[in-house]
Amino acid sequence: MSLEFARSARSTVGIEWEVALVDRASGDLVNIADEVLDALRCPDGAAHPTITGELLLNTVELVSGVHDTVGHAVADVAGQLSEVRRALEGRGVDVICSGSHPFAQWFDQTVTDKARYHRLIDRTQWWGRNMMIWGIHVHVGIEDKAKVIPIMNGLLTYVPHLQALSASSPFWAGVDTGYASNRSLMFQQLPTAGLPWDLPDWDAWERYVDDMAVTGIIDDVTEVRWDIRPSPRWGTIEIRVCDGVSTTVELGAIAAFIQCLVEWMSTRLDAGDDVPRMQPWFVRENKWRAARYGLGAEIILDAAGNECLVTDDVRRLIEILSPVAERLGCLPELQGLHRIIDDGGSYQRQLAVAAASGGSLPAVVAALSHELAQGLGS
């Protein structure tokens, strides 16, 4: 199967931000995304061009345009969030973003009435119905499809960094799971989700997609739900490993980190250098460590098996990537990674709120709502 890779300007960036709708009084999820999307229709009755629905009716997704800078992409989705808030006025409903909801139950949620979602639930059953999860997806433009697989393989080294920085799903259906990111382990139960297979080049990717389509596992390439995947339609690599983030500061910092890593690797390839990669078993172990321990994870750094605390390596990488960030116009956003480390990740903040409020999970939802409205450190 030959997959056309769209033309895309190098290191341009786009962001998809999934947010959840919650009752202001109880903190529970509410399934009114269809009503919100109807309220956001254009004057001619057409659907909003960039605010869309998702698998469950408790979710809306904000999709940026293609931007040269992370700052513009974040401003784009932040503006869409303001539109959603206006559509919610008078409904007693707030918006939050985290990897999971602290206490909602899967059996209370309504699946969006679209054929592709019904097919997914019919096939995946209990695991599919449990997908009460939210994430951010960051697209970065790749100007040459020959670079896609080498960069994707290189990015697998940084899965634990991204997982730890974004981790925001310590609770699941009212239970403290003991994991910083329960979402990441939940999502990989879907048959085409999780870490990508180890592929040598673009031809191998096309053979993989062909195998999956011929056997009826997928109907189209978008049903490959890897943590990091090629996105041929947009000419990008799409990084999907992150939990949902609850503030624009975190969104900008993580998107800048991703954009800089991709540009850094692309520059290495231009110079004729290889992009370093790790054994798949190290990559898998790193993902688990970051999901379990978050910013406290000790991770494997390289193929030689060297290890260090993930936060120490993030600070090292900020220094390495700062010249790239200056060139891309995202240095202030990249520096925001320090703030995540210093102020604590979302999973840490949620656990602290629960502990300070006698274990109240509605209090955690209220704190998430406040953070999204007022910002990190508010």
Image: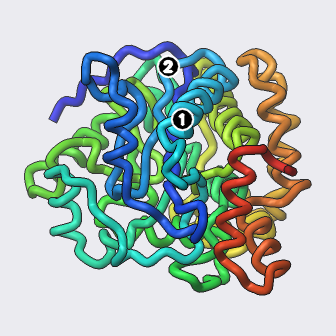
Residue at 47 percent of width and 28 percent of height: 147
- Residue type beneath disc 2: Val
Q: Is residue 108 above or below residue 80?
A: below
Give the residue number, with chain letter if any, for mark 1: 86
Residue depicted at x 75% and y 17%: 329
Q: Camera-side residue: 329 or 149? A: 329
Crowd around label 2: few <14 · some 14–19 · many ≥20 (10 Å): many
| Residue 46 image label | none
The outermost residue toward the front is 90
Q: Earlier along the polypeptide chain: callout 2 or callout 1?
A: 2
Camera sees residue 31: yes
Q: Name the one closer to the observer, 152 or 57.
A: 57
User: Image height check: is 261 above or below 182?
Assistant: above
Front residue of 207/260: it is 260
Give percent across and percent down for residue 131. 39, 66
Q: Quadrant of residue 268?
A: top right
Closer to viewer: mark 2 or mark 1: 1
Q: Is residue 239 visible?
A: no
User: At which x and y percent is residue 365?
Assistant: 65, 65
The span from disc 2 to disc 1 (Cα, nearest Å) is: 24 Å
Q: Is residue 195 above or below residue 323?
A: below
Q: Is residue 30 left or right of residue 270?
A: left
Image coords of residue 234 (percent x, y): 37, 25
